[in-house]
């Protein structure tokens, strides 16, 4: 079995700003896993915050080469732990390989991956569209350029957060979700939640830093009038149990957790604990977005607009129109490079 790596540097439609900084281009690594005439595609993004570069992930995937034949007669779930081990715990690189393996596995069996997992394409939540931090006028302009979405996710973590949400509320009746990306204190979160609920916000994503104390997180969990969803605090499988009692739900991202195999386990565990489930994305192509979309039957919330934020998507896959996700009937993960 062969593996090929493709490095992409993709301009973003608008500079994308969150509380931690701004990017104008997205760097992605596409993994192609090939076995004869069949191939599978996976994707992972370079990420400065978590310390993953093209070079570090390429080195990890090189270490996996001698073990790739295991995918010929074993499911991706069976092989996942071994691959993580040989890649020295590199969850980002393992995620891309796991996606490619699922794509190949589904194609080998002639079914979309969600069907391979025993899921039905029913009760599918709509995706939100993300408005990155900018001047208020520019944030309004971004919203106006994407009319018709039923949910907008607003990036916050500035000195004017409530003013931003008030201004955007004047331009749409859609539901809002806000993501502070670790930018608030516990006191700010509890206070802001009161006004944000009045402004039609559904939940707050990761208001506190991931290193905040359990006491701070618990005080927000108990006092906030809005649900609190973990993102940076929920990276890998053990984090779900750690977030129980401190967050109302978890946002699982394939790059961070190590791919579809752990994502499935995390979402099922969260549901068993009575927590809300969400899958988010990086700014990425339709390869990564399509993979995440196969998890939609397990979700309460979805944020899968990453490919729409690119100036041009070099891949094709699921179609997302105003948040409504249409899954192609192709086998595997239903994505292709253009």
Image: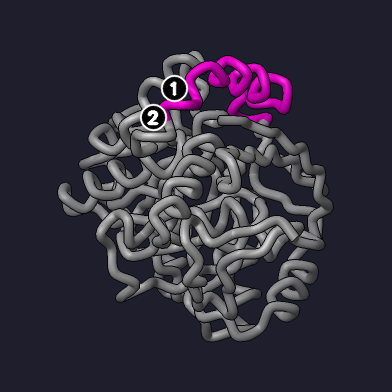
On the picture, is 287 further left or further right than 273?
Answer: right
Q: Secondary structure at mark 2?
A: helix
Q: Which mark is residue 84?
A: 1
Image coordinates of residue 179 in percent, x first then y, are 52, 54
Above-or-below relation of 177 to 48: below
Q: Residue at x 81, y 43 (%)?
A: 9
What percent of the width, then of the height, locates residue 55?
Answer: 72, 21
**Mark 1 element type:** helix
Total numbered labels placed on residues in the image: 2
Of residue 126 and residue 289, the one placed in the foreground of this image is 289
Q: Please tell me whether the stretch drawn in magenta is mainly helix, strand or loop.
A: helix
Residue at the spot x=44%, y=22% of the render? 84
Q: Nearer the viewer, residue 320 or 261?
A: 261
Please state if 36 lies on the left or on the right of 233 as rendered.
right
Label 1 crowding class (10 Å Cα cut-off): few <14, some 14-19, many 20+? many
Q: Residue furthest front?
A: 36
Q: Position of residue 157 (x, y in %)?
A: 60, 49
Q: Residue 78: horizontal and vertical position, in percent? A: 31, 32
Q: Is residue 52 magenta?
A: yes
Residue designated by label 2: 80
Task: State the scheme by which the image is colored.
Answer: one colour
Note whether 76 is above or below 87 in the view shown: below
Query: Which one is nearer the viewer's eye here, 280 or 114?
Result: 114
Magenta range: 48-70
Q: Is residue 177 magenta?
A: no
């Amino acid at each position: 079995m062969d593996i090929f790596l493709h490095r992409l540097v993709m301009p973003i439609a608008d500079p994308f700003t969150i509380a931690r900084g701004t990017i104008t281009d997205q760097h992605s690594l596409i993994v192609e896993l090939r076995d004869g005439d069949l191939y599978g595609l996976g994707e992972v993004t370079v990420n400065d915050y978590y310390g993953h570069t093209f070079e570090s992930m390429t080195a990890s995937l090189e270490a996996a080469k001698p073990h790739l034949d295991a995918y010929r007669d074993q499911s991706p779930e069976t092989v996942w732990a071994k691959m993580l081990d040989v890649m020295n715990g590199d969850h980002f690189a393992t995620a891309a390989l796991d996606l490619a393996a699922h794509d190949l596995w589904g194609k080998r069996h002639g079914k979309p991956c969600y069907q391979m997992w025993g899921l039905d394409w029913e009760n599918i939540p709509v995706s939100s569209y993300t408005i990155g931090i900018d001047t208020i006028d520019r944030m309004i302009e971004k919203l106006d350029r994407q009319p018709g979405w039923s949910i907008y996710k607003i990036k916050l973590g500035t000195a004017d957060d409530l003013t931003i949400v008030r201004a955007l509320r004047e331009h749409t009746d859609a539901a809002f979700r806000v993501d502070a990306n670790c930018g608030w204190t516990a006191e700010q979160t509890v206070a802001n939640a009161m006004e944000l609920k009045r402004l039609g916000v559904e939940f707050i994503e990761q208001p506190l830093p991931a290193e905040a104390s359990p006491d701070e997180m618990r005080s927000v969990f108990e006092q906030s009038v809005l649900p609190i969803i973990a993102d940076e605090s929920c990276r890998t499988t053990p984090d779900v149990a750690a977030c129980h009692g401190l967050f109302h739900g978890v946002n699982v991202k394939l790059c961070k957790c190590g791919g579809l195999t752990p994502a499935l386990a995390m979402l099922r565990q969260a549901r068993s604990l009575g927590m809300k489930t969400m899958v988010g994305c990086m700014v990425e192509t339709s390869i990564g977005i399509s993979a995440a979309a196969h998890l939609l039957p397990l979700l309460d919330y979805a944020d899968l607009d990453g490919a729409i934020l690119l100036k041009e998507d070099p891949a094709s896959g699921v179609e997302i129109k105003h948040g409504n996700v249409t899954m192609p009937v192709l086998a595997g993960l239903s994505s292709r490079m253009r």
